[in-house]
Amino acid sequence: MKLKSVGKLFIGMLLTGATTSAGAVSLPAIIGNHMVLQRKAEVTIWGWGNTGEEVTVTGSWDNKPVKTKVNNQARWEVKLQTSAASSPQTVTVKGYNTLVLEDVLLGEVWLCSGQSNMDWNANAGIDNAEQHIQEANYPSIRFFQVSKRTADAPQLDLPGQWVVCTPETMKHFSAVGYFFGREIHQNLKAPVGLINSSWGGTPAEIWFSAPAIASNPVLAESAAKRKEVEYGPTQPAKAYNAMIAPLIPFRLAGALWYQGESNVDAPDVYAQMLPALIQDWRTAWKNKFPFYFVQIAPYKYGGAEEWPRLAEAQLKTLSVPNTGMAVISDVGNVDDIHPRNKLDVGKRLAAWALNKTYGKKDVLFSGPVYREMKKEGDKIRLHFDYADQGLVVKGKELTHFEIAGEDQKFVPAQAKVDGQTIVVSAKGVKNPVAVRMGWSNSANPNLFNKAGQPASAFRTDNWPKRN
């Protein structure tokens, strides 16, 4: 190219605005107009610029400038202490150029992730969709939708932008996330930011970082067995690299997880996988944030005991500190893997957060959870957590209880509520040793507590899968 042509090209670029000043500071997509920053916390603002460039970041809530310099990787980062200011704020980033972020709120920020039931929106079809869409005018709730992408290595940025909750934006956003956020917003009277990073049909393995999978032989073996499918990736870390890594270290109040349907083929592995994923994310964020997840609903899977064993794996994850599980067996649909009642799912997740994260001790957050059994002659008495106010049967009598003797052959059982316990027996079983409740793919048990929360399916034994 001749020098004269180069000059004309350069002038043309200037006239069309195709260039920016050398070393201009820039920001990742997650940091922008209309965003929600975690209130009353140390938050990280980061971006890129020219090596050695001085960058100053100022939040309007305290007008205290924080300075840093761009490092030799062209990256910079500062920490800001946020307040509880309720009005819209600005964040000013000044380097060789100046960026002013407008309409920034300080509130509660939650990451929503998983597969299709988390990604499912009102536009796709939920109960009372038209009413919920029309009512979705909440200027203090903000959405960030992460686009579906894959990558072979952790990415620095991703496409997306923060938007205000309106009927038009709500109908395309995670319905579970929205109902959760609305419940938090209405109870705390605080802004809520929701980030949805979900992908239908995906196994949990793709949401891990590569080192976390590689360092765990059980998870690595499971991931290696995954076969390609047409609706999404199955290789380890593919979604993490493109859809989770770029969000780090944006400060979160916590994470919500609705996934498991694509892992029913290996429930024993999932019992290790979900705790490992929680640890992986907490390590990446350097924050032991709350992690609340949904126990997937019963569904007519092809094999035997796929749902109850996966549900059991999720139940066991409650042993991980600062976690909670929303049971939704009563609002599922055994004929539809995508139950349309997303309102109760979001509200049950919110109940965990309101009580455990935000200290609203009057909010009842869990259904009965099996704790222990005691043999009483030809009967077994079951004891439960979260049954202090008593147990409730929705219907004439308890259903989906089975009992077995030492022969390990389960038969339908009679089960009766006795205060905060349940007594189980069967005429043909004189020496019972084990009880199961809801132990089939299509089970819909009717045991609740007085808070109206359903009990999780459970078993008292650890016997092999029955054919």
Image: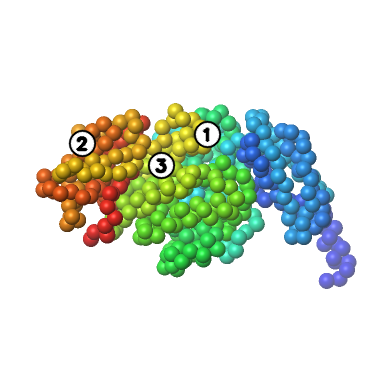
Label 1: how many residues lie within 10 Å, few (<14), some (14-19) or many (20+)? Answer: few
Q: Nearer the viewer, residue 122 or 314?
A: 314
The mark that comes first in sequence, 2 or 3, is 3
Q: Residue at x 42, y 48 (%)?
A: 319
- C-alpha distance separating marks 2 and 3: 25 Å
Q: Nearer the viewer, residue 169 or 302?
A: 302
- At which x and y percent is residue 454? 33, 38
Q: Which residue is mark 2?
A: 416
Q: Which residue is mark 3?
A: 326
Q: Secondary structure at mark 1?
A: loop
* Direction from residue 271 to residue 33 in the image, left or right: right
Amino acid tagged 3: Ala
* Direction from residue 175 to residue 304 in the image, left or right: left
The mark that comes first in sequence, 2 or 1, is 1
Q: Quadrant of residue 330?
A: top left
Q: Nearer the viewer, residue 222 or 125?
A: 222
Amino acid tagged 1: Tyr
Can residue 125 be seen? no
Q: Quadrant of residue 1?
A: bottom right
Q: Which residue is mark 1?
A: 358
- C-alpha distance separating marks 1 and 3: 17 Å
Can residue 406 be seen? yes
Q: Nearer the viewer, mark 1 or mark 3?
A: 1
Locate the C terminus by quadrant: bottom left
- At which x and y percent is residue 457? 31, 46
Q: Residue at x 57, y 59 (%)?
A: 241
